[in-house]
Amino acid sequence: MVIESIPKAVGFIYGLLAFAALAWLWYSGRFTRRRALPFLIVSALLGFLVFAPVFPYQLQMVVLGNAAALGSPLPMAIGGLLLFIVLALVLGRVICGQVCPAGAVQELMYLLPAKKRGRAESRVPVAVRAGVFVVFLAAGLGLSVNLLALIGLPAFFHLAVASASFFVFLGIVLLSATVYRPFCRYVCPYGALLAPAASKGLYRLLRTDACIGCRKCERACPTGEATPAAGLGECYLCGRCTEACPVDGALVYGRGK
């Protein structure tokens, strides 16, 4: 379904504009999950129409040195990926939350009325993803193996139903109806780079003195990052915690200490 005549730069430009709009919604206190829904839908559609901005696969192409698949020179692609890591360091993982098509399709699937499972502490998926990241680098740099193609990320968005790998990623997407973002949390190599940056984010979700300790935000968070001691590296800024909070001003997005 991907339309090859559409430049991949369209996805990058959308990524910048969507990131800016979502960051402004958070900063101004206007972010809601209802307002985020159009971004999720557009991001998912761009994945199928342009296959961009699918940041984990762009990182894969950089590792393999495949400028043709990137649609841009390697230095430009590297610069773009580094830019969003810097933005995560400042504003958190907005790019993962609603902009990346791979994350968007999983977030949309999780909205389906199915029993939710796997709300474990974030340390377990982080450890798994770190191991996968090492394999990802070894496969790409040492063996020139496209690990994400084996998992079926490009086949899924290209609707290559004749490929067995299409059904691998389709299974991951279907699993995300009950397990929150399995690809993002356990596999995504770009997420492995964004999470440490976001954990040091200049702007983040903060508890204020208005918090009454009801723990509704903690029960609503699908990644375990709403606890007071959480580092927020695995916070996707989905808005479930702020939506569940019963006290205005108890949980806000602002500049951390």
Image (tube, grey):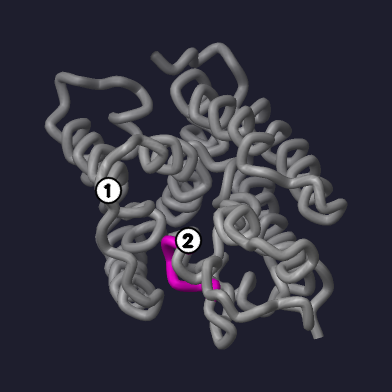
Q: Main secondary structure of the magenta part?
A: loop
Residue ID at (55%, 12%): 5
Where, quadrant-wise, is the C terminus in this rendering?
bottom right
- Residue 11 quadrant: top right
Residue 246: x and y in percent read 65, 61
Query: How crowded is the residue under tag 2: few (<14 C-alpha within 10 Å), some, or many (20+)?
Result: some
Q: Amino acid at mark 1?
A: Thr
Location of residue 213 (image quadrant): bottom right
Apparent side of residue 230 relative to residue 151 in the rendered image (left or right): right
Q: Quadrant of the N terminus?
A: top left
Q: Is residue 29 above or below residue 231?
A: above
Q: In the image, what residue occupies the spot 58% across and 25% down?
A: 42
Residue 54: x and y, percent? 50, 40
Nearer-the-camera pick, 123 or 140: 123
Q: Nearer the viewer, mark 2 or mark 1?
A: 2
Query: According to the image, label 2 marks what residue?
Result: 220
Q: Is residue 149 visible?
A: no
Which of the numbered marks, if any, corresponds to residue 178? 1
Look at the picture and state if 23 lies above or below 223.
above
- Of label 2 and label 1, which has the lower sequence position? 1
The residue segment tinted magenta is 221-226
Q: Amino acid at mark 2?
A: Ala
In the rendered structure, does residue 210 fall within the stretch colored magenta? no
